[in-house]
Structure formats: structure tokens, C-alpha cells
Amino acid sequence: MSEKNFSEQLIAAIDKKTDWFNSRELQNVLEQYRLMHTCEKTLYEFLLKKSLITPDPYKNDKKISDIVPPENSPFTDNERSMIIGMRLSDYDSTLDFLCNYYKFSVSNLQISNIKKLIDLNNAIQWNSFSVNSTNINTRTIATLLFNAKQGADALTVNMINDSVSKAGKAVLAINKSLKALTEFQREVYKGNIRKNVMSHPSFSAEKAASSPDDEKVQIKKLFQATMGKTPYYNELIDEIIDEDHSPDKANLQKALLKKLEVENSSAQNSEEKIDTKSILLVALRVFGAMPGQISQAKEKIIENHEVLESEHNTFFEKLKKALRKAFNIEEKPVFYQIPITDQTTDTVRHEKIDYQQFIRDLELRSRRYASAGIRKAPLYEKISQQSEEKILEYVNQQILECNKMLKILNGLDEFFKSAPLPQNRSKIKGLKMEITALKNSIVKANQRRSEYTAYIEEEAQLRKLGITNA
């Protein structure tokens, strides 16, 4: 094979492999990070709910624009709640940045950025999650979760174990893909030298072909001018020289082209039917990440309600409450007139909601989703055994109800900010953080539902055309 033909074949193979990484492998990495983020958020919010860590008061003020793993330096026992709360908060924000804003592509994921991802993956060692871990963050979080599981119900224990297990599997899958990408980036580097340096008009192919040393001289002469700030790696340049001058160059070239081949799995895929039910069950499990967020929102609403109640908590009101409690009489219903914004028309209407009933609804939804989102939990098992139509119906209903819940939470957030007396407004706790987290979960569930619906519709269209094996 001539050097020109080999270079052309190599560059074409690299371009094809780049497309494969961008469209498939790195999209899988993104999905694994989304799974990892869901698991981490479940554990983070569980520890917050149990007051085992202190929430980071500056979380919403921090702007994440790069991959920065949380610190792993030692701290005292007295600082544990605050330090781990802050580190988990930073870890959560970085994962959120990755899942929603980061570009997963070969051009963006150079070796330096791959190293940052690896460092982030090692910040908490989900695959060696033990109270005896040498990693201080891992050891401390494992200890906190171990203590939290003592005396907890089986459902909670399953939720914790399931989240840790899934996070560990996600990290393994991500690291495997990043290792493959690291190896591929070496070939991209070499391909860029062939494309930019060795194809330059000033590059003498004749001199380069005369000896290995002459080829290296030609590359060095034009490297800076054609490759810009790209570092000069002797090891990779030597590989190029070997591929062009080694006595075994024919085998080296053949092996390299073979290594860069993208497996053609279209024949296999045509015989494999996509498991559409599993797509729906992933949507179902997304709801399993919501109980912590719902419970946290509920606690804040109760505290805000108590602030309002305290403004007219006269002696007679206290006496009435004491009598109701003594004689087991139901509390007098409390209704709030809250603003509800219609996103499509951007109009605001007011709706009266029953405060006590809404709190009961939140408690019920939190318990239900805790069971629906975990494999082997009774509700999950019951739903997963139903037909796809029934599961889709359930997912549709939950997305509808959750969107309604979000509207009420937004309305309550606005209401509580303006309802108290001016001197009490600083005591009110905002709901924006919980609303954002819940909205992200609903978006993820909706994406899975859309994926399922699109596949079913495509399948129906193909059947109409008489195509049954696409």
C-alpha cells in the first residue's frame, strides 16, 4: 500500500470513527452520567432530609463552567456535616452541569478533559463504597448512609443500596468508554499530523520517504506552523515513523485500520427487537428520584405556613388548638389563594387550594414514588408486570399530576414571599431549588416517554408499508 493511499484510508477511518463516538458512544456516556446524577441526588437529598449533612447556603450562587471534582482533604469530626454537605453539593452541581450543558464530543474531550472526568469519577468511589475506604469522601458518605440505614424501613434501605449499586455500574461503563476514547485520541493526533503537516505543500514527501530521520525532520520543521499550540509528542511521532518505515509496516498499517473499524451492527440490530417496555420502566424509575425533593418542599411549605399562622396566634387561637388536640377534633381547613401562571399564554389566574389536603397529597406522592422507583419494591413489581399500554397510561398520568404539582408549588412560592408581614418575610424559605430539581426529573421522564412513543409510531408506519424486520 502506498503511503498516500494509507494516509487517505487512515484519515477516512478516523473521521468515520469520530462520527461513531459523537453519535453513539459519547451519547451513552452522557446517559450514564444522567443515571449517576439521579442516584447521587437521591442519596444527597436523603442525607439532607435526615439532617446528617448541612445544605450549602451558596449552592445557587456558584456558577459551574468546568469539570472540577470536590475536594478530598481531611477535616475534623465537628466539620463533617458542613464539609460533606458542601462537597456533595459541589459534586451534584458538577454532575448537573455535565448532564445539561457539557458537550460530549471527540473535539471537546481532549486528553486533558478526559483526565478531569476521571478525577470526578474517582472523587467518590461508588465501586469501592465502604466505611473502610481510604478515600475520605467515600468513607464519610458510606458511614453516614450506614448510620442512616440503621432502624430504617426495608424500602429506604433498598433505595440506598440500589442507588449506590447503579452509580457504581454507571462509573464502570463511563470509565470503559473514556479509556477507549483516550486510545482513539492518540490516533486522532496522528491523523491530524498526516492531514495538516504531511499534506502541507512545503512538506517534502520524497525526503520523508528516504529515511525515518528525514521524515521526522520534515514533521518537526512544519509542526508548529501547522499544529498551533498542540504539544509535540515524541512517542506518537515515532509511531507514525514506524507505520511508514518499519520493516513490518504493512502489518502495522493493516492492524491500525482494523482497530479503527466501526462494527457494522445493522444486520444484528435488524433481528433484535428493541425492548420498548424497558424504555417505559426507565421513565417509571425516574420518579424514584423525586421523594427527597418532594419531602424537602413539603417541610419548607409547613415552616412557611407556621410563619403565617404565628402572625395571628392569639391566646384564644392557642386555646382552640389545644382543645382540638385534646378532643381529637380535626384542624379547621386552611385555604390559600395562590397565583397560577399559564406558560402557553403567560397569563396569571388565582386558584384556591386546601393547604392540609395538598400536604397530604405530597406525603402520599413521596411514599408512592419511593416504591415505584426501586426494582423489587412491591409497587414497581406490580406495575412492571402490566402491559405496556397500562404502564404508559400510568407514566402519562404521573407526568400530568407532577406538572400540576409544579404549578401549585410555584404558586405557593410566590404566595409565601408576599403574604407575611414585612418583618417576617426573611423567615420564609424559597422553593426554587426543589422546583428546579423536580422539573428536571419530569423532563427526564418525559424524554423517555417521547422516545417510547416515537419508536411505537415508527414501527406502526413501517408495518403499514409492509416492512416488518426494520
Image: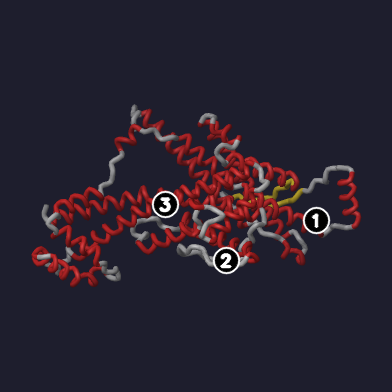
Q: Is residue 420 visible?
A: yes
Question: According to the image, label 2 marks what residue?
Answer: 61
Above or below residue 281? Residue 49 is below
Residue drawn where x is 57% and y is 44% of the image: 287
Question: According to the image, label 3 marks what residue?
Answer: 174
Identify the amino acid type marked 2.
Answer: Asp
Left or right of 297 on screen, residue 335: right
> In front: mark 1 or mark 2?
2
Secondary structure under badge 3? Answer: helix
Quadrant for residue 62, please give it: bottom right
Which one is in front, 157 or 470? Answer: 157
Residue drawn where x is 55% and y is 48% of the image: 441
Identify the amino acid type marked 1.
Answer: Glu
Left or right of 407 on screen, residue 262: left
Badge 1: residue crowd in 10 Å (few <14, some 14–19, many ≥20): few
Which one is in front, 123 or 215? Answer: 123
Cα–Cα span, label 1 and label 2: 31 Å
Badge 2: residue crowd in 10 Å (few <14, some 14–19, many ≥20): few
N-term mark: 3 or 1: 3
Residue drawn where x is 77% and y is 67% of the image: 423
Question: According to the image, label 1 marks what residue?
Answer: 309
Q: Position of residue 133 (x, y in %)?
A: 52, 57
Q: What quarter of the picture does the C terminus occupy?
A: top left
